[in-house]
Amino acid sequence: MRTRRWPRHLDRTSDDAGRRVTTHEDITDRARNEKKIAFLAQHDLLTGLANRAVFSEKIEKAVRRLQRHGTKFTMLMLDLDKFRMINDTLGHRLLIEVVRRLRSLLRDTDVLARLGGDEFAIIQENETNQREGAIGLALRIIDLIEQPFDLYGQRVVVGTSIGIASAPEHGADTETLLQKTDLALYAAKSRGRNDFHIFQSHLSEAADLQKSTESELLDAILRNQFELHYQPILKP
């Protein structure tokens, strides 16, 4: 099998005597390296999935399709339960196997990305019923991921928590959708893990209240507005 060679770079100059001089440079290696660098800039090195930056671009494209053609879509954000317990020993191998299982559940039109660590995200489009489609996919993911993994002869069991937000119901821009999907994921983990949760407005209200409270507490600390009181404990 012949190795493909890229066209040579031609550089034409004139020497001191006015004669035309042409030099040839084989740029095969340069083109190959540039292609590799471009791939690494857009993909996760371990799994080969799209990275966070590319995933954000995919959301923006989905938003434009929504605006132009009314194509609705859903975002699912998930991370693994109990991942920290095995991260140092079998973490990388587990992530590779999780990706293999996730891919087996998705269509060619779905987008799967690794956002970092054990956190993944999916864009699901063209469902007849957005809500039912997302719930069905979430349940299939939970069921498949909780099946035991055989990693180098060791039996490993993990779960997954999933947050769900839909466009345009829950937002129609990248930042809003990422934020609301993340809030839904946090709610799923708070409810006991290995479950899914669809975004609801009270999650934003609770997050806003928490931020406001934290801001007020910080301001009170800076202004030295706290007083320390002791409550005596009296025994009968």
Image: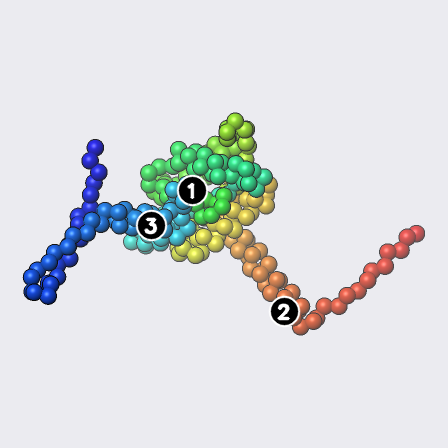
Q: Neighbour class for label 3 at 10 Å: few (<14), some, many (≥20)?
A: few
Front residue of 16 and 50 = 16
Q: Distance between the residues labelled 3 and 2?
A: 46 Å
Pointer 3 or 2: first along the chain: 3
Residue 161 on image: x %, y %: 52, 41
- The percent coordinates of residue 150 (x first, y second) are 50, 28
Residue 215 or residue 191, whichever sits in front: 215
- Asked if 106 appears above or below 210 in the picture, the reply is above
User: Which quadrant holds residue 174?
Assistant: bottom left
* Amino acid under disc 3: Ile
Q: Name the residue under label 3.
A: 37
Read off the residue under disc 1. 46
Q: Which residue is pictured at 15% across the width and 55% down the height?
A: 23
Residue at the (83%, 60%) spot, across then down: 231
Q: Is tag 3's residue or tag 1's residue first in the polypeptide sequence?
A: 3
The residue closer to the viewer here, 87 or 147, is 87
- Horizontally, is 140 left or right of 219 in the view? left
Q: Nearer the viewer, residue 226 or 71?
A: 226
Position of the N terminus by quadrant: top left
Q: What residue type is labelled 2?
A: Asp
SS class of the residue under badge 2? helix
Q: Residue at x 58, y 39 (%)?
A: 85
Q: On the picture, is 219 further left or further right than 134? A: right
State the residue lying farthest toward the front. Answer: 17
Q: Is residue 136 visible?
A: no
Q: Where is residue 212 in the image (x, y as percent from the top left)?
A: 59, 63
**Residue of label 2:** 219
Point out the tag, 2 or 1, that comes first from the N-terminus.
1
